[in-house]
Amino acid sequence: MIIKKASFIKSVYDESEFINDNLKKIAFIGRSNVGKSSLINRLTNNSHLARVSKTPGKTVSINYFLINDTFYFVDMPGYGYAKGSQEKVSTFSDISDKYIKSGLLDYIFLLVDSRRVTSDDISMMNYLKEYKIPTKVILTKIDTLKRNDIKKRLLDSKNILEVDEKDIILFSSNTKEGMDNLLSNLENILNL
């Protein structure tokens, strides 16, 4: 799959603004600062498409990006930090909750920092399983791991999150490692 075109469509702060058309919607969700925006920018080869922030909890809206005029990437608010607070708390935005329950999402990629799976990540995976939305895990920032640690982190994540190894994608926004695998997965999801 080749992404030739990517456009920001809108930011949504209220459920009345959810896009409800016949195009597939693929969401990216994860803890604050796990690399959602960086991943979207890398996939679309546009470093300015999704806003990248060093401040946890900065994204409070659901952001839609139209890809190749045929489907959407949906950047969801991060969980794990309260807006405006540097203290870690278990939070999940009301708008994200409503969107997941809306039935409008076709697929979710749960982004998890490859260096550590947190209790927030486990809770999110259990939550997504409850709503039966097809989900794969993307282990981000694998470039920060030593080569011989990657397989161990993959197996640990598989066991902790209780998912099949085939449902985990290793990815680095910095080195593009895992890019072909992720694009292939997207192609299969979209049945291209």
Image (cartoon, helix red, strand yellow):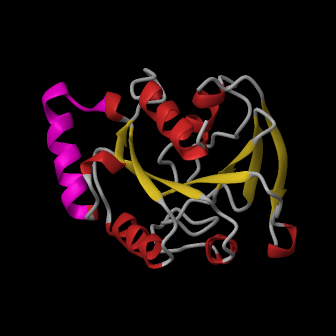
On screen, 133 above or below 8? Answer: below
Q: Which residues are magenta?
A: 144-160
Residue shown at 30%/46% (left/top)? Answer: 166
Query: Which residue extends farthest front?
Result: 191
Q: Is residue 81 magenta?
A: no
Q: Establish if 178 lies above or below 16.
A: above
Residue 159 falls inside the magenta stretch: yes
The vertical placement of 67 against 101, above or below, is: above
Q: Residue drawn 58% across and 42% down? A: 191
Q: Residue at x 45, y 67 (%)?
A: 88
Q: Is 167 above or below relative to 159? A: above
- Residue at 35% x, 50% y is 167
Q: Is residue 156 left or right of residue 106?
A: left
Depth check: 67 or 172 in front? 67
- For the stretch drawn in magenta, what is the main secondary structure? helix
Q: Quadrant of residue 171?
A: top left
Query: Does residue 134 appear to the left or right of 112 in the view shown?
Result: right
Specify the quadrant of the image occupied by residue 151. Answer: top left
Which quarter shows the N terminus? Answer: top right
On the image, the x and y values in percent for residue 100 come to 61, 71
Instruction: State the quadrant of the C terminus.
Output: top right
